[in-house]
Amino acid sequence: MSLTTIILSLAVGYGQPVDHQQAGCIAQAIWFEARNQPIAGQVAVAVTIMNRVGSNGYPDTPCEVVNQPYQFSYTLRPKQE
């Protein structure tokens, strides 16, 4: 099973539609946060994102969740002066 298939299966399981762009955001988060981890660690990143999508305390799409400030280390950007 490919990682893309896992991502889309997770999204369907959570009842959230995930288009190509949203799947790309999840895949990017997995790459930067867990690329050196076994598949279980990579799936855990996707599950975390989808749990947040389903929570009232977070945005409604994977891309919005991933790009929220201070949620994932690779999205941290230096302060603009």
Image: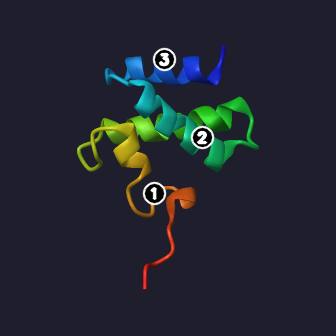
Q: Position of residue 45 (x, y in %)?
A: 55, 40
Question: What residue is pinned by disc 3?
Answer: 9
Name the outermost residue toward the top: 1
Q: In the current view of this chain or complex, which residue is farthest to the front?
A: 81
Amino acid tagged 3: Ser
- Position of 50 with respect to 45 (left or right) is left
Q: Is residue 57 left or right of residue 11?
A: left
**Dividing the picture into quarters, in which one does residue 60 lie?**
top left
Q: How many neighbours does mark 2 have within 10 angstroms: few (below 14), some (14-19), or many (20 or more)?
A: many
Q: Earlier in the sequence, mark 2 or mark 3?
A: 3
Which disc, if any, is residue 30? 2
Q: Nearer the viewer, residue 51 or 18?
A: 18
Disc nearer the start of the sequence (1/3) = 3
Residue, disc 1: 71
Report x, y in % for residue 6. 56, 20
Q: Quadrant of the C terminus?
A: bottom left
State the image quarter where residue 15 is shown. Answer: top left
Label 3 sits on a secondary structure element that is helix
